[in-house]
Image (cartoon, helix red, strand yellow):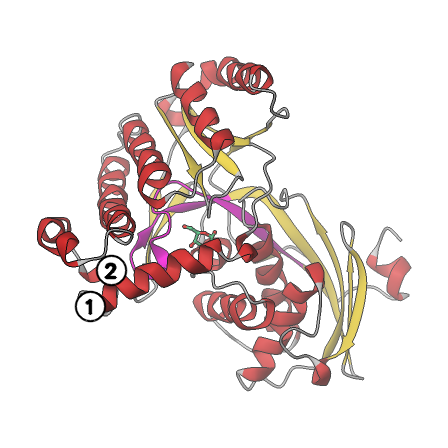
Amino acid sequence: MSTFTELYGRAPEGEWAAPGRVNLIGEHTDYNLGFVLPIALPQTVRAQAGRRDDGLLRLHSTQGGSAEAAVTDLAPGGVAGWAAYPAGVVWALREAGHDVGGAELFLDSDVPAGAGLSSSAALECAVALAYNDLYGLGLSAPELALLAQRAENAFVGVPCGIMDQMASMCCRAGAALHLDSHDLTVRQVPVDLAGAGLALLVLDTRVKHDLGDGAYAALRAGCERAARLLGLHSLRDLGFADLPSALPQLPGELRPLVRHVVTENERVEEAVAHLDAGDLAPLGPILTAGHASLSEDYRVSCPETDLAVGAAVAAGAHGARMTGGGFGGSVIALVEAQAADKIAAEVTTAFHAAGYATPRTLTAVPSEGARRIA
Ligand code: GAF
């Protein structure tokens, strides 16, 4: 089946798109109520949708196949695989008291899955926006992002922060989203890569990124424990100047986590200052320092992401880092636009020499967040 009309025997009521993202800097800071700086990718999940009046939710994904459930039967753990994300959004809307019923959804995506580029949040946000319009809910983009996060936390069972859903819902073309995860205030920070003669390479290592394996949850729990031990509401309340007195109060295994979170919040603010000054190349060393912190302190890198960062910098990138949750996934590299192909080729050569699969290369252009497209 290749279209909504062929599958469901009628035309959709509309079509919505929500993008994946790369985060420029600010990793594992969102659930510590700190700062992040993602951009939306041009790649999106598209949802064609129409309401049903019998309470049935019918889902079809070009990549994943079909699933269906009665909306009144939706319960955490009750839907397996990819369909849990859209079903979770409908569940979260109903849990929040919104009187939404069934629908038919035809989903298609060009956001690479499992690459740390937030394909799950894009799926959730496309469905949330479709339901918002179909059922006339009038919810704002941050409200929809929170519902999508709730779907992922409580229905799918992944304890993610709010960055990916806010990025997918709220990013604007030509800008990075400076998000304060504490109160969800946002500022659009212009990023004119082309004007600076730069490009942002995305190197997907093809090492499967999966936040559901418990490591992400353990890191999050470690940060929350550190905050409690320090008598803080969250690690957001710890400044760089507090580190020397705070770290000795913590068990050894928590110190590197705290050091990463506090220094990473600083790196976000430094990066924003450079972007505001229209000075993009100095972002490079900030990215590379962020990667070192993720690799050595937070320990969410892996040999493939470390190699991609090292090879990109050795080939002339201004800077590079893993992006997203880690444990595989993608690396971003800030490069001179005219050197992009050469740098991508040198990373690929390094991967082959190490016996790794050929990385997939994309170029990230700061793109528009979730929107209705038809
Ligand atoms: C994943 C999560 F979904 C985000 O909330 C964020 O914590 C990120 O990992 C790490 O910065 O993408």
- Residue at position x 55%, y 87% from top? 97
Q: Which residue is mark 2?
A: 235
Determine whether, in the image, residue 227 is placed left or right of residue 168. left
Out of 170 and 78, give the one closest to the viewer.
Answer: 78
Q: Give the class, few, some or many, for how many residues have Cα within 10 Å of label 2's Cα (few <14, many ≥20).
A: many
Determine whether, in the image, residue 323 is placed left or right of residue 271. right
| Bounds of the magenta segment | 16-40
Q: Quadrant of the C terminus?
A: bottom right
The amino acid type found where label 1 is placed reads: Leu
Residue 95: x and y in percent read 56, 83
Determine whether, in the image, residue 310 is placed left or right of residue 350. left
Residue 178: x and y in percent read 33, 51
Look at the image and say whether residue 45 sits in the magenta stretch: no
Look at the image and say whether residue 24 sits in the magenta stretch: yes
- Residue at position x 42%, y 59% from top? 218
Disc 1, SS: loop
Q: Which residue is mark 1?
A: 232
The mark total stands at 2
Q: In the figure, residue 359 lies in which quadrant?
A: top right
Out of 372 and 265, give the one closest to the viewer.
Answer: 265
Q: In the figure, residue 226 lies in which quadrant?
A: bottom left
Q: Give the class, few, some or many, for how many residues have Cα within 10 Å of label 1's Cα (few <14, many ≥20).
A: some
The amino acid type found where label 2 is placed reads: Leu
The CA span between labels 1 and 2 is 7 Å
Residue 276: x and y in percent read 25, 39
Q: Are marks 1 and 2 in contact (CB under 8 Å)?
A: yes
Residue 146 appearing in the image:
yes
Residue 316 appearing in the image:
no
The residue furthest front is 252
Disc 2, SS: helix
